[in-house]
Amino acid sequence: MSLLNIKLSKESETAKSKYVKPFDFFLIILGLYFSFTYYVRYEAKVLALCCLLATCGGLLLPVARKVFRTYIQVANYLVAILFFVILGISIFTGGVKASSIWWIGVTPVVAALLLNGFYSIVWFILVTIEIIVLYYLKTHGMLPDSVVPPEKMDQFLTTSTIAGIFLLTTLCIIADTLRERLSLQKEELQSKAFRLTQLASLGSLASGVSHEINNPLAVIKGSQLKIKRMIEGDEPVDKKTLKNYMDKIERNVRRIQEITSSMRAISDKDSHKKIIAINMEELVMSLASMAKERIGQKNILVVTEIKSNELYFSGIYNEIFQAMFNIVDNSMDELIDLNNDQGKIEISLDRTGSDIIISVKDNGRGIPENLRGNIFDPFFTTKGIGQGTGLGLTYSFNVLSYNGGTLELVNQATKGTTFKATLPILQT
C-alpha cells in the first residue's frame, strides 16, 4: 500500500482502534490534572480553561463516534484536541520560547499511532507551520505575555527533542507501511484461497445440480410414459388417475424451477443493479417486518435489538436483504416445524471496529455438531424432503463474501441457532 494512501486496511483499522479508548482516557486524566495545576498553583485561568476544554472534548468521544461514521474521523478528532490544547498552552506561555511548544511535536507521533503514515505527515506539516507562525508572532510582539515562566531549554535539549520526535514519527510510518503490506498480502492469499475453495466446490455443485434435477425429471418421465400408455390403450382414460399424474408432473416442474431460480440468484451479478448506501437499521427493521408477515397468526415472537445507530453499507440492497432474509427464513421454518408456542427469533445490529454485525438467533433445536461443517455447502439441508433446496445459506455466504463480509455459525452451549454476519462499514 502506498505511503500516501489516505485509507487504512481493514486489519490495520481494527488493530489501531484498540488504542482509541486508552489514549482518550489518558487525555482526560492529563486535562484534569493540568487544569487543576494551572488554576490552583499558577492562577492561570485561561490555561486552566484550555485544559478543561480538552477534557470535555475527550469525554465527548462516544458522541463523536455517533456523529462521525468512520474511524479515520474519530481518530483525527482526538489528535486535533491534543494539537489545539498544546498550541493554546504554548501561545499563553511564551510561544516558541515556551517549554510546552516542544510537546506539540508529539502530535504527528500520536497521529501515526492512531491513524497511518499519511496523516502523520499531514500533522507533522501542520506542526511545522504552527511553530513558524508562532516564531513570527513572537518576534513581532503579537503574542500574550508569558503567564507561566518558561523553563530554560538549552540547545542540546531542544535539538534532541526535535530529533526524537522526528525519529518516532519515522518509525511509526515505517511500521504502518509494513503492516499495510502484510495486510494486503494476507488479503490476497485469502482471496486466492477463496477462489480455490470455489473451484473445489464446483464439482460438488455440479453433482448436486445433476442429482437434484434428475430426481424430479425421472418422476416427470415416468408420469409421461404412464399417461402415454393410458392414451394409446384401448381402455377409457381415467380422469382421476390422469389428474394425479398431471399434479405429480406440476410439482416436480415447480421443484426444478425453484432449483434453477436459486442457482441464478447465486451467480447473478448483473452490472445494472444499483449500488447504494444501505441504512442497516432500516434493513433490520424490514427483515423483522417481513418475518412477522410470514409468521402471521402463529405464536412466534420476532424481536430486534439496535445496539448501534447510523450504520451504513455500500452495496446492492436486494442482494443483502435476500442474503439476510434467507437466514431469518430458516429460523422461521425451524420454529414453525416445531410448532412451539414459545418460539422466538432475535435480530440484532451492532458494530465492532470497522465492521457491522448482524446476528440472527432462534430458540429452535439447533444444528447438530456433526452437520455444522456442511451447512454452507450447495444442496445441503436439514429440512425434510421437498421442503428446501439447500441453496439459501450458500447464496447468503457467497453474497456476504462477495461484498467483503463473512457469515458464520456461532457455537452455543444452549439450544438454538445463531448466525453472525459481518459487513464493512461504509467509509465516507
Image: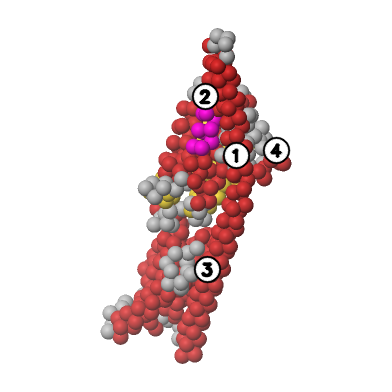
Which x, y percent locates residue 350?
51, 46
Q: CA distance from mark 1 to mark 3?
A: 44 Å
Residue at which label 4 appears = 368
| Nearer mark to the viewer, of 4 and 1 | 1
Residue at which label 1 appears = 210
**Residue neighbourhood size for the residue with mark 2, other residues' Cα within 10 Å, grouped as few (<14), some (14–19), many (≥20):** few
Q: What amino acid type should be assigned to the residue bearing mark 1?
A: Ser
Which x, y percent locates residue 380?
63, 39
| Nearer mark to the viewer, of 4 and 3 | 4
The reply to whether dot 4 and dot 3 touch (C-beta < 8 Å) is: no
Residue 10 shown in magenta: no
Residue at which label 3 appears = 180
Q: CA distance from mark 1 to mark 2?
A: 19 Å
Q: What amino acid type should be assigned to the residue bearing mark 4?
A: Pro
Vertical arrangement, residue 71 with respect to residue 422, above or below? below
Q: How many numbered marks appear?
A: 4
Give the magenta range: 253-261
* Mark closer to the chain start, 2 or 3: 3
Vertical arrangement, residue 220 with respect to residue 310, above or below? above
Left or right of 65: which side holds 142? left
Which x, y percent locates residue 56?
43, 59
